Protein backbone atom coordinates (compact mmCIF):
# COMPACT_ATOMS: atom_id res chain seq x y z
CA UNK A 1 0.00 0.00 0.00
CA UNK A 2 1.16 3.53 -0.78
CA UNK A 3 0.79 5.10 2.67
CA UNK A 4 -1.56 8.03 1.91
CA UNK A 5 -5.33 8.23 2.30
CA UNK A 6 -7.49 7.59 -0.76
CA UNK A 7 -10.92 7.98 0.87
CA UNK A 8 -12.07 9.63 4.08
CA UNK A 9 -15.83 10.14 4.58
CA UNK A 10 -17.89 11.12 7.60
CA UNK A 11 -21.61 10.56 8.13
CA UNK A 12 -22.43 9.71 4.51
CA UNK A 13 -26.18 9.05 4.15
CA UNK A 14 -28.66 8.26 1.38
CA UNK A 15 -32.39 7.56 1.37
CA UNK A 16 -34.82 6.53 -1.37
CA UNK A 17 -38.55 7.24 -0.98
CA UNK A 18 -38.13 7.78 2.73
CA UNK A 19 -36.16 4.58 3.31
CA UNK A 20 -32.60 5.08 4.55
CA UNK A 21 -30.19 2.90 2.55
CA UNK A 22 -26.90 4.26 3.92
CA UNK A 23 -27.06 5.72 7.41
CA UNK A 24 -24.19 7.97 8.59
CA UNK A 25 -21.35 5.86 7.22
CA UNK A 26 -17.82 6.97 8.15
CA UNK A 27 -14.60 5.26 7.14
CA UNK A 28 -11.07 5.77 5.84
CA UNK A 29 -9.36 3.80 3.07
CA UNK A 30 -5.61 3.92 2.47
CA UNK A 31 -4.09 4.37 -0.98
CA UNK A 32 -3.35 1.05 -2.64
CA UNK A 33 -5.60 -0.85 -0.24
CA UNK A 34 -7.97 -3.63 -1.22
CA UNK A 35 -11.04 -2.76 0.84
CA UNK A 36 -13.93 -5.21 0.96
CA UNK A 37 -17.60 -4.47 1.60
CA UNK A 38 -19.77 -7.28 2.90
CA UNK A 39 -23.38 -7.51 3.94
CA UNK A 40 -26.73 -8.99 2.91
CA UNK A 41 -28.54 -7.82 -0.20
CA UNK A 42 -30.00 -4.37 0.36
CA UNK A 43 -27.39 -3.44 2.97
CA UNK A 44 -26.24 -0.33 1.08
CA UNK A 45 -22.97 -1.57 -0.44
CA UNK A 46 -23.73 -0.59 -4.04
CA UNK A 47 -25.31 2.71 -3.01
CA UNK A 48 -22.20 3.66 -1.07
CA UNK A 49 -19.93 2.81 -4.00
CA UNK A 50 -22.07 4.90 -6.35
CA UNK A 51 -21.96 7.89 -4.01
CA UNK A 52 -18.18 7.69 -3.96
CA UNK A 53 -17.84 7.80 -7.72
CA UNK A 54 -20.37 10.61 -8.18
CA UNK A 55 -23.18 8.55 -9.67
CA UNK A 56 -25.36 9.36 -6.64
CA UNK A 57 -25.40 12.54 -4.58
CA UNK A 58 -25.37 11.95 -0.80
CA UNK A 59 -28.26 13.34 1.23
CA UNK A 60 -25.92 14.06 4.12
CA UNK A 61 -22.34 13.78 5.28
CA UNK A 62 -19.04 14.88 3.86
CA UNK A 63 -15.68 13.56 2.79
CA UNK A 64 -12.97 13.35 0.20
CA UNK A 65 -12.10 10.79 -2.45
CA UNK A 66 -8.71 11.00 -4.17
CA UNK A 67 -8.29 14.49 -2.76
CA UNK A 68 -11.64 15.88 -3.99
CA UNK A 69 -14.85 16.65 -2.15
CA UNK A 70 -17.39 13.86 -2.74
CA UNK A 71 -20.29 16.32 -2.86
CA UNK A 72 -19.02 19.45 -4.63
CA UNK A 73 -16.24 17.97 -6.77
CA UNK A 74 -17.72 14.66 -7.91
CA UNK A 75 -17.08 15.65 -11.52
CA UNK A 76 -13.35 15.68 -10.83
CA UNK A 77 -13.46 12.29 -9.12
CA UNK A 78 -15.25 10.36 -11.87
CA UNK A 79 -12.40 10.47 -14.46
CA UNK A 80 -10.07 8.94 -11.86
CA UNK A 81 -12.31 5.93 -11.16
CA UNK A 82 -12.76 2.63 -12.92
CA UNK A 83 -16.19 1.13 -12.24
CA UNK A 84 -17.11 -2.48 -12.86
CA UNK A 85 -20.75 -3.43 -12.20
CA UNK A 86 -21.88 -6.89 -11.17
CA UNK A 87 -23.53 -7.61 -14.52
CA UNK A 88 -21.46 -7.60 -17.70
CA UNK A 89 -22.18 -4.22 -19.25
CA UNK A 90 -20.12 -4.20 -22.45
CA UNK A 91 -21.50 -4.98 -25.91
CA UNK A 92 -21.90 -8.70 -26.52
CA UNK A 93 -22.18 -8.23 -30.30
CA UNK A 94 -18.79 -6.48 -30.49
CA UNK A 95 -15.43 -8.22 -30.36
CA UNK A 96 -13.01 -7.92 -27.46
CA UNK A 97 -10.90 -5.40 -29.37
CA UNK A 98 -13.95 -3.42 -30.53
CA UNK A 99 -15.27 -3.18 -26.97
CA UNK A 100 -11.96 -1.95 -25.65
CA UNK A 101 -11.60 0.53 -28.51
CA UNK A 102 -15.07 1.85 -27.74
CA UNK A 103 -14.20 2.25 -24.04
CA UNK A 104 -10.96 4.01 -24.96
CA UNK A 105 -12.95 6.50 -27.05
CA UNK A 106 -15.36 7.10 -24.16
CA UNK A 107 -12.45 7.84 -21.84
CA UNK A 108 -10.65 9.93 -24.51
CA UNK A 109 -7.53 7.80 -24.04
CA UNK A 110 -4.52 9.19 -25.86
CA UNK A 111 -2.79 6.89 -28.38
CA UNK A 112 -5.93 4.80 -28.23
CA UNK A 113 -4.84 1.86 -30.38
CA UNK A 114 -1.57 1.41 -28.50
CA UNK A 115 -3.45 1.56 -25.20
CA UNK A 116 -5.93 -1.09 -26.36
CA UNK A 117 -3.21 -3.45 -27.55
CA UNK A 118 -1.25 -2.99 -24.32
CA UNK A 119 -4.35 -3.79 -22.27
CA UNK A 120 -5.14 -6.85 -24.38
CA UNK A 121 -1.65 -8.15 -23.66
CA UNK A 122 -1.72 -7.25 -19.98
CA UNK A 123 -5.03 -8.98 -19.35
CA UNK A 124 -4.01 -12.02 -21.44
CA UNK A 125 -6.86 -11.47 -23.88
CA UNK A 126 -4.80 -11.96 -27.05
CA UNK A 127 -6.28 -15.39 -27.97
CA UNK A 128 -9.80 -13.90 -27.80
CA UNK A 129 -9.19 -10.45 -29.23
CA UNK A 130 -11.38 -10.99 -32.31
CA UNK A 131 -14.03 -13.08 -30.57
CA UNK A 132 -17.45 -11.59 -29.84
CA UNK A 133 -17.79 -10.68 -26.19
CA UNK A 134 -21.04 -12.63 -25.98
CA UNK A 135 -19.17 -15.83 -26.87
CA UNK A 136 -16.75 -15.54 -23.95
CA UNK A 137 -17.05 -17.58 -20.76
CA UNK A 138 -18.08 -15.80 -17.59
CA UNK A 139 -14.49 -15.56 -16.38
CA UNK A 140 -13.21 -14.02 -19.61
CA UNK A 141 -16.13 -11.61 -19.73
CA UNK A 142 -15.14 -10.35 -16.30
CA UNK A 143 -11.52 -10.06 -17.38
CA UNK A 144 -12.67 -8.01 -20.39
CA UNK A 145 -14.81 -5.82 -18.14
CA UNK A 146 -11.82 -5.23 -15.85
CA UNK A 147 -9.66 -4.37 -18.87
CA UNK A 148 -12.25 -1.79 -19.94
CA UNK A 149 -12.29 -0.27 -16.46
CA UNK A 150 -8.49 0.05 -16.47
CA UNK A 151 -7.94 1.60 -19.90
CA UNK A 152 -7.77 5.18 -18.61
CA UNK A 153 -5.42 4.22 -15.77
CA UNK A 154 -7.72 4.99 -12.84
CA UNK A 155 -6.44 5.57 -9.33
CA UNK A 156 -9.49 3.91 -7.76
CA UNK A 157 -11.40 0.79 -8.80
CA UNK A 158 -14.98 0.20 -7.68
CA UNK A 159 -15.93 -3.45 -8.19
CA UNK A 160 -19.50 -4.52 -7.47
CA UNK A 161 -19.50 -8.29 -6.84
CA UNK A 162 -17.14 -8.81 -9.79
CA UNK A 163 -16.67 -12.57 -9.41
CA UNK A 164 -20.30 -13.59 -8.99
CA UNK A 165 -21.06 -16.64 -11.11
CA UNK A 166 -17.55 -17.38 -12.37
CA UNK A 167 -15.51 -20.51 -11.73
CA UNK A 168 -12.88 -20.84 -8.96
CA UNK A 169 -9.91 -20.70 -11.35
CA UNK A 170 -11.19 -17.49 -12.94
CA UNK A 171 -11.79 -16.01 -9.49
CA UNK A 172 -8.23 -16.78 -8.43
CA UNK A 173 -6.80 -15.25 -11.60
CA UNK A 174 -8.98 -12.18 -11.08
CA UNK A 175 -7.63 -11.70 -7.57
CA UNK A 176 -4.06 -12.00 -8.78
CA UNK A 177 -4.77 -9.04 -11.06
CA UNK A 178 -6.19 -7.05 -8.13
CA UNK A 179 -3.08 -7.72 -6.04
CA UNK A 180 -0.87 -6.58 -8.90
CA UNK A 181 -2.85 -3.35 -9.20
CA UNK A 182 -2.58 -2.81 -5.44
CA UNK A 183 1.18 -3.06 -5.76
CA UNK A 184 1.02 -0.33 -8.41
CA UNK A 185 -0.82 1.96 -5.97
CA UNK A 186 -4.36 1.48 -7.29
CA UNK A 187 -6.98 1.46 -4.53
CA UNK A 188 -9.77 -1.08 -4.88
CA UNK A 189 -13.17 -1.12 -3.23
CA UNK A 190 -14.89 -4.44 -3.77
CA UNK A 191 -18.28 -5.72 -2.64
CA UNK A 192 -18.55 -9.48 -2.28
CA UNK A 193 -20.57 -12.24 -0.65
CA UNK A 194 -17.66 -14.71 -0.67
CA UNK A 195 -15.89 -15.15 2.67
CA UNK A 196 -12.72 -16.51 1.07
CA UNK A 197 -12.54 -13.31 -0.98
CA UNK A 198 -13.15 -11.18 2.10
CA UNK A 199 -10.15 -12.82 3.72
CA UNK A 200 -8.01 -11.67 0.79
CA UNK A 201 -8.78 -7.99 1.47
CA UNK A 202 -6.50 -5.71 3.48
CA UNK A 203 -9.50 -4.23 5.32
CA UNK A 204 -13.23 -4.90 5.50
CA UNK A 205 -16.47 -3.15 6.31
CA UNK A 206 -19.63 -5.07 7.18
CA UNK A 207 -22.87 -3.20 6.39
CA UNK A 208 -26.27 -4.23 7.69
CA UNK A 209 -29.46 -2.28 6.98
CA UNK A 210 -27.44 0.75 5.88
CA UNK A 211 -25.27 0.89 8.99
CA UNK A 212 -21.59 0.10 9.43
CA UNK A 213 -21.50 -2.78 11.89
CA UNK A 214 -17.76 -3.42 12.04
CA UNK A 215 -14.59 -2.47 10.17
CA UNK A 216 -10.94 -3.51 10.30
CA UNK A 217 -8.60 -6.12 8.87
CA UNK A 218 -9.90 -9.72 8.74
CA UNK A 219 -7.59 -10.60 11.64
CA UNK A 220 -8.78 -7.63 13.70
CA UNK A 221 -12.45 -8.41 13.08
CA UNK A 222 -12.05 -12.05 14.12
CA UNK A 223 -10.06 -11.10 17.23
CA UNK A 224 -12.58 -8.40 18.17
CA UNK A 225 -15.50 -10.82 18.02
CA UNK A 226 -14.22 -12.74 21.09
CA UNK A 227 -15.77 -15.89 19.65
CA UNK A 228 -14.32 -19.25 20.68
CA UNK A 229 -14.81 -22.17 18.31
CA UNK A 230 -14.78 -25.94 18.40
CA UNK A 231 -15.35 -28.59 15.76
CA UNK A 232 -16.72 -32.07 16.39
CA UNK A 233 -17.05 -35.13 14.20
CA UNK A 234 -18.48 -38.53 14.94
CA UNK A 235 -21.91 -40.21 15.19
CA UNK A 236 -25.26 -38.55 15.81
CA UNK A 237 -24.26 -35.03 14.80
CA UNK A 238 -27.75 -33.99 13.69
CA UNK A 239 -29.27 -34.73 17.09
CA UNK A 240 -26.23 -33.22 18.80
CA UNK A 241 -26.68 -29.99 16.85
CA UNK A 242 -30.27 -29.61 18.04
CA UNK A 243 -29.22 -30.27 21.63
CA UNK A 244 -26.31 -27.81 21.56
CA UNK A 245 -28.38 -25.01 20.03
CA UNK A 246 -30.43 -24.95 23.23
CA UNK A 247 -27.42 -25.13 25.57
CA UNK A 248 -26.36 -22.06 27.59
CA UNK A 249 -23.11 -20.60 26.29
CA UNK A 250 -23.56 -21.95 22.76
CA UNK A 251 -24.29 -19.11 20.34
CA UNK A 252 -23.70 -20.80 17.01
CA UNK A 253 -23.89 -24.36 15.67
CA UNK A 254 -23.17 -24.79 11.96
CA UNK A 255 -22.83 -28.06 9.98
CA UNK A 256 -19.64 -28.05 7.92
CA UNK A 257 -19.09 -31.13 5.79
CA UNK A 258 -18.92 -34.12 8.14
CA UNK A 259 -18.38 -31.93 11.21
CA UNK A 260 -20.22 -29.44 13.37
CA UNK A 261 -18.73 -26.07 14.22
CA UNK A 262 -19.75 -24.81 17.63
CA UNK A 263 -18.99 -21.29 18.87
CA UNK A 264 -19.69 -18.92 21.75
CA UNK A 265 -18.25 -15.77 23.32
CA UNK A 266 -17.95 -17.02 26.90
CA UNK A 267 -15.17 -19.61 26.74
CA UNK A 268 -15.91 -21.24 30.12
CA UNK A 269 -19.66 -21.50 29.54
CA UNK A 270 -19.03 -22.92 26.05
CA UNK A 271 -16.68 -25.58 27.40
CA UNK A 272 -19.18 -26.45 30.12
CA UNK A 273 -21.94 -26.79 27.49
CA UNK A 274 -20.00 -29.23 25.35
CA UNK A 275 -18.43 -31.18 28.25
CA UNK A 276 -21.28 -33.77 28.54
CA UNK A 277 -20.85 -34.66 24.86
CA UNK A 278 -17.08 -35.07 24.73
CA UNK A 279 -17.30 -38.88 24.60
CA UNK A 280 -19.58 -41.23 22.64
CA UNK A 281 -16.93 -41.79 20.00
CA UNK A 282 -16.75 -38.16 18.96
CA UNK A 283 -13.64 -36.11 18.34
CA UNK A 284 -13.58 -32.50 19.52
CA UNK A 285 -10.99 -29.95 18.46
CA UNK A 286 -10.58 -26.34 19.43
CA UNK A 287 -10.09 -24.36 16.24
CA UNK A 288 -9.53 -20.79 15.03
CA UNK A 289 -12.74 -18.83 14.52
CA UNK A 290 -13.50 -18.16 10.86
CA UNK A 291 -14.54 -14.85 9.37
CA UNK A 292 -17.80 -16.44 8.24
CA UNK A 293 -18.65 -17.45 11.81
CA UNK A 294 -18.02 -13.88 12.96
CA UNK A 295 -20.31 -12.37 10.35
CA UNK A 296 -23.07 -14.90 11.02
CA UNK A 297 -22.80 -14.03 14.71
CA UNK A 298 -22.83 -10.28 14.03
CA UNK A 299 -25.89 -10.63 11.81
CA UNK A 300 -27.69 -12.69 14.45
CA UNK A 301 -26.78 -10.14 17.11
CA UNK A 302 -28.06 -7.29 14.92
CA UNK A 303 -31.37 -9.09 14.31
CA UNK A 304 -31.84 -9.63 18.04
CA UNK A 305 -31.30 -5.91 18.67
CA UNK A 306 -33.67 -4.81 15.89
Image (cartoon, rainbow, N blue to C red):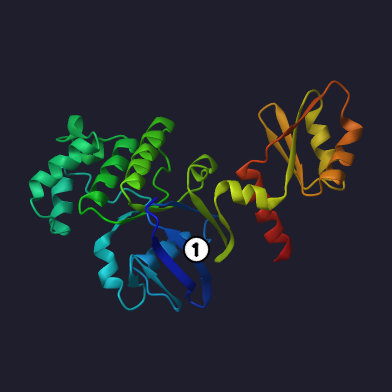
One can see residue 279 in this view: yes
| Relative depth, front residue between 132 and 164 | 164
Query: Is 44 situated above or below 89?
Result: below
User: Quick one: SS at disc 1?
Assistant: loop
Residue at horizontal 72 percent and vertical 50 percent from the top: 226
Left or right of 245? Residue 255 is: left
Q: Is 118 positioned to the left or the right of 231 in the image?
A: left
Q: Position of residue 180 (x, y in %)?
A: 33, 41
The answer to whether 250 appears left or right of 200 in the picture is right
| Residue beneath the point at 31% across and 72% down | 74
Mark 1: few/some/many CA within 10 Å (<14, 14-19, 20+): many
Quarter of the picture holding the C terminus = bottom right
Q: Which is nearer the eye, 280 or 68?
A: 68
Circle 1 sits on which residue?
Answer: 44
Q: Residue furthest right?
A: 276
Q: Nearer the viewer, residue 96 or 230?
A: 230
Q: Residue at x 26, y 42 (%)?
A: 144
- Quadrant of residue 270 in the image? top right
Q: Position of residue 168 (x, y in %)?
A: 44, 32
Q: Position of residue 4 (x, y in %)?
A: 38, 60
Amino acid sequence: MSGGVAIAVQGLSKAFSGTTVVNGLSLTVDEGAIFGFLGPNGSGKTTFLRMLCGLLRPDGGSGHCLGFDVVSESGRIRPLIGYMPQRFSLYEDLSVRENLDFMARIYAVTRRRDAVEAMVERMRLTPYVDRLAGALSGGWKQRLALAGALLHRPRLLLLDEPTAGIDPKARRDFWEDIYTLSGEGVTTLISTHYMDEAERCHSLAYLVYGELLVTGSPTEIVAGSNLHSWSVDGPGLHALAETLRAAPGVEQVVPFGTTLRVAGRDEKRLEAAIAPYRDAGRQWRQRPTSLEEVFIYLMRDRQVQS
